[in-house]
Image: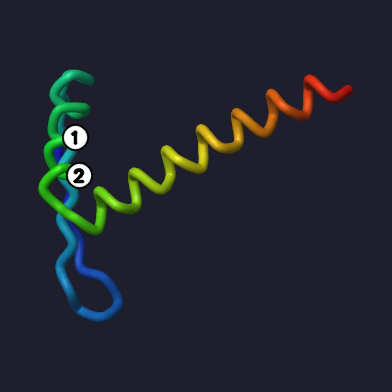
Amino acid sequence: DSESYQNKKGQYVHYVAMQMSTADVEENMVNGISNDSKLKQDFELKKFREIYQQELDKFSDGNR
């Protein structure tokens, strides 16, 4: 499906909706992140923070 309109600035905006399998979406995201060094750094930092928080939570639970 698609929809087009003109915004207040006079610019045309066009939205397109399409279906993709979750495997295709995941593959495209991973490829996009792998090919962009800034995105790759941001992604790796986010993963590090998640793992770090999990380990802190484990440590906190063990000291209660």
For numbered disc 1, what is the local secondary structure? helix
Is residue 17 or residue 45 the one in the foreground?
45
For numbered disc 2, what is the local secondary structure? helix
In this figure, what is the number of numbered marks?
Answer: 2
Q: Tag 1: residue type?
A: Val
Residue sitting at x 77%, y 29%: 60
In the visual, does 4 lie left or right of 60?
Answer: left
Q: Tell me whether the residue at label 1 lies in contact with that at label 2, contact meaning CB atoms closer than 8 angstroms.
A: yes
**Is residue 54 depicted above or below 32 in this figure?**
above
Q: From the image, which quarter does the C terminus lie in?
A: top right
Picture quadrant where residue 59 is located: top right
Picture quadrant where residue 54 is located: top right
Q: Which residue is mark 1?
A: 30
Could you classify mark 2 by the number of other residues whose Cα lies within 10 Å: few (under 14), some (14-19), or many (20 or more)? some
Residue 16 image label: none
Residue 57 x %, y %:
69, 29
Could you classify mark 1 by the number of other residues whose Cα lies within 10 Å: few (under 14), some (14-19), or many (20 or more)? few
Residue sitting at x 51%, y 36%: 50
Task: Give the residue furthest to the right.
Answer: 64
Q: Tag 2: residue type?
A: Ile
Residue 33 image label: 2
Is residue 42 or residue 19 the one in the foreground?
42
Distance (Cα) linking label 1 and label 2: 5 Å
**Is residue 14 depicted above or below 64 in this figure?**
below
Residue 55 x %, y %:
61, 29
In the visual, does 23 lie left or right of 60?
Answer: left
Residue sitting at x 30%, y 52%: 41
Q: From the image, which quarter does the N terminus lie in?
A: top left
Residue sitting at x 15%, y 68%: 12
